[in-house]
Image: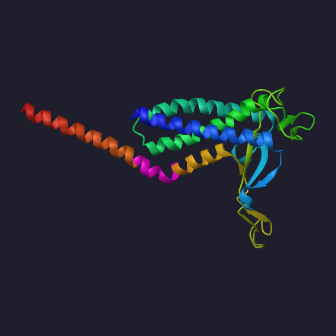
């Protein structure tokens, strides 16, 4: 059972990483930054190529020092997550739980690859400019190879999925933001972000089911053990 659950987790991780990286590399080497393309002509589903220096869903985490700190934190989390995956596979966690953990792990690793290596793999990218004290973009389309745009740990994460399904305004009476534009869904994200969110949401929604199955399996094992012990006691008498 251990090997089966671990194999399932590894398979999911590899699949998510493959899709995530293929899409990112294709977008980065075929689209100029800021390019917007409607998916199948739909206005609410778009490819909108941007890069970000920070956390998932385009959020930022301070300046250059914050960027390196976040990347190192991701690296430590992935290393620790590797041990957790093996531990979870050994214990009585359900396959569904393992799938969720694998999705979260794969998403974290997918964005970590961008942060660690994209600065060295591509000739152009969002990078920190000390003269401006902020991150600056670039013109044209990036290419792989040649001199990179940043050093190890300083790459920017590629985002491209954008689903502005609702665009309206807050009611004028709404506190603090009344009359201001409202958009759902505003963040621009990538496959790795989607994997993380899917895994977390599924864990929250199905946590009781996962826990009940694990507890039930443990109780069944204990009951079987008690029955065997009782049988052996009766035989001895």
Residue furthest out toward the left: 237
Q: Is any part of residue 64 visible from this angle?
A: yes
What colour scheme governs how the chains and residues are painted in the rendered image of this protein? rainbow
Residue drawn at the location 57% of the way across and 30% of the way down = 80
Residue at the spot x=53%, y=41% of the render? 101
In the picture, the quarter occupied by the C terminus is top left
Instruction: Look at the image and give the residue range highlighted in magenta.
Output: 203-211
Question: Image check: 150 left or right of 229?
Answer: right
What secondary structure predominates along the stretch shown in magenta?
Answer: helix
Horizontal and vertical percent for residue 230? Answer: 15, 37
**In the rendered structure, does residue 205 fall within the stretch colored magenta?**
yes
Q: Is residue 68 left or right of residue 94?
A: right
Q: Is residue 154 depicted above or below 46 in this figure?
A: above
Q: Quadrant of the N terminus?
A: top left
Q: Position of residue 113 (x, y in %)?
A: 69, 33
176 left or right of 8?
right
Q: Quadrant of residue 192?
A: top right
Measured along the vertical axis of the image, is residue 198 above or below residue 72? below
């Amino acid at each position: 059972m251990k090997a089966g659950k671990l194999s399932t987790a590894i398979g999911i991780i590899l699949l998510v990483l493959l899709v995530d990286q293929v899409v990112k590399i294709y977008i980065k080497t075929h689209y100029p930054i800021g390019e917007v393309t409607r998916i199948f002509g739909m206005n609410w589903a778009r490819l909108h190529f941007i890069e970000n220096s920070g956390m998932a869903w385009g959020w930022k985490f301070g300046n250059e020092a914050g960027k390196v700190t976040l990347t190192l934190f991701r690296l430590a989390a992935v290393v620790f997550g590797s041990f957790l995956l093996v531990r979870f596979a050994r214990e009585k966690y359900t396959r569904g739980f393992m799938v969720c953990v694998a999705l979260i792990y794969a998403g974290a690793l997918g964005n970590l690859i961008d942060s660690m290596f994209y600065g060295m793999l591509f000739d152009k990218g969002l990078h920190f400019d000390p003269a401006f004290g902020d991150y600056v973009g670039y013109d044209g389309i990036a290419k792989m190879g040649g001199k990179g745009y940043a050093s190890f740990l300083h790459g920017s994460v590629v985002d491209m999925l954008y689903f502005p399904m609702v665009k309206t305004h807050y009611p004028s009476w709404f506190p603090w933001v009344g009359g201001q534009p409202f958009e759902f869904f505003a963040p621009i994200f990538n496959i790795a972000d989607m994997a993380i969110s899917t895994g977390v949401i599924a864990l929250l929604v199905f946590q009781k089911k996962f826990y009940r199955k694990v507890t039930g399996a443990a109780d069944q094992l204990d009951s079987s053990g008690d029955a065997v012990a009782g049988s052996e006691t009766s035989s001895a008498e």
